[in-house]
Structures are given as structure tokens and as C-alpha cells.
Image: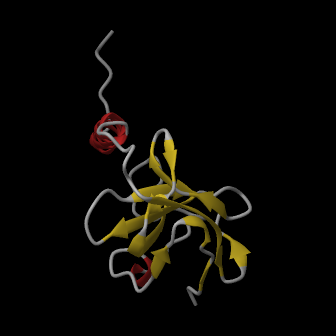
Amino acid sequence: MGIPVMNFGLFYRLVLILVISISYGCGDTSEINLGKVTGTITVNGQPLSDGEITFQPGSGRPSLGMTNSLGFYELHYTKGKKGALVGSHSVIITTSMPDDGRTQSPGLLTIPSRYNTATELSFEVKPGQNKADFQLDIN
């Protein structure tokens, strides 16, 4: 019986998840000024399911969220704190990559670069509750 060989892409993702998980809870965030952020993401009028959204401030820690089957998300600054830093953010929206490491897969929704790597999206987070809905057009 041989030793199982792990796919490099899977190994890379596991290491990345571990690093993010460790850093996610590090540092004192008690004095951080956060605004709560929730919203819905649609693509061509349909909810974006299993999408990833990142609010990236000019400096500081980004906030992350995942959409549910209705396209709803809530941002998390750290494991125990919801929200995003008050101020201006670039907004990045992506979908999960397939587990087999291929760049395309049947049924996989590809979000154009204008919504992620070359994002045109932004949002100003204010103290308190913020609603940030995004309607993406990928036609």
C-alpha cells in the first residue's frame, strides 16, 4: 500500500486556508472602527450563490463574506467581529474555483475581471449598518 499523493492545487488551498485561519483571529481589534455590512449580489438578475466578496480598504485588513443561495452575504472582519473598516473600499467579487483545479468546468460561473482583478466596484462603509447590494452584468 503506497502513500496517497495529494494534488498540488488542493495542498496549496489547504495551506492558504490554514494561514488565513491563523491570521484571521490575530491582533487586537477592540479599538477598530467597523461598520456592519450586508447585502445581496445578483448576476444578470439572478442571485449569485456561493460567491466570495472582499471589501479591501486603502490600507488595513480586508473583510470577507460568502453568498448563500439567495445571493445574501454578511462581511466578517475577523472570526469574532462582523463588519468592515469605516471608509472607502474596493470591492472584489469572485466565485469558488472547482475542486479539480481546472480553470473552467461545466456550470461554473466566471465573473469578469471588472468585478475582481480589475475591479470597478467600490463602497464607502459608514459607522452602523450598511446595505451594499451589487447587480453584476456579465453579458
The x and y percentages for residue 68 are: 67, 55
Above or below 78: residue 47? below
Above or below 132: residue 13? above
Colouring scheme applied when the structure was drawn: secondary structure
Residue 107 in the figure: left or right of residue 14:
right
The x and y percentages for residue 80 are: 49, 39
Residue 124 in the figure: left or right of residue 68:
left
Near-viewer residue (126 or 48): 126
Residue at figure coordinates x 74%, y 62% from the top left: 70
As drawn, the residue found furthest toward the bottom would be 139
As drawn, the residue found furthest toward the front would be 31
Above or below 31: residue 88? below
Near-viewer residue (103 or 16): 16
Residue at figure coordinates x 49%, y 45% from the top left: 81
The x and y percentages for residue 137 are: 59, 87
Residue 47 in the figure: left or right of residue 61:
right
Residue 98 appears in the rendering = yes
Query: What is the count of numbered marks?
Result: 0
The x and y percentages for residue 129 are: 62, 65
As drawn, the residue found furthest toward the top would be 1
Near-viewer residue (109 or 51): 51
Residue at figure coordinates x 43%, y 48% from the top left: 100
Residue 131 in the figure: left or right of residue 55:
right
Q: Quadrant of the C terminus?
A: bottom right
Residue 97 appears in the rendering = no
Q: Quadrant of the N terminus?
A: top left
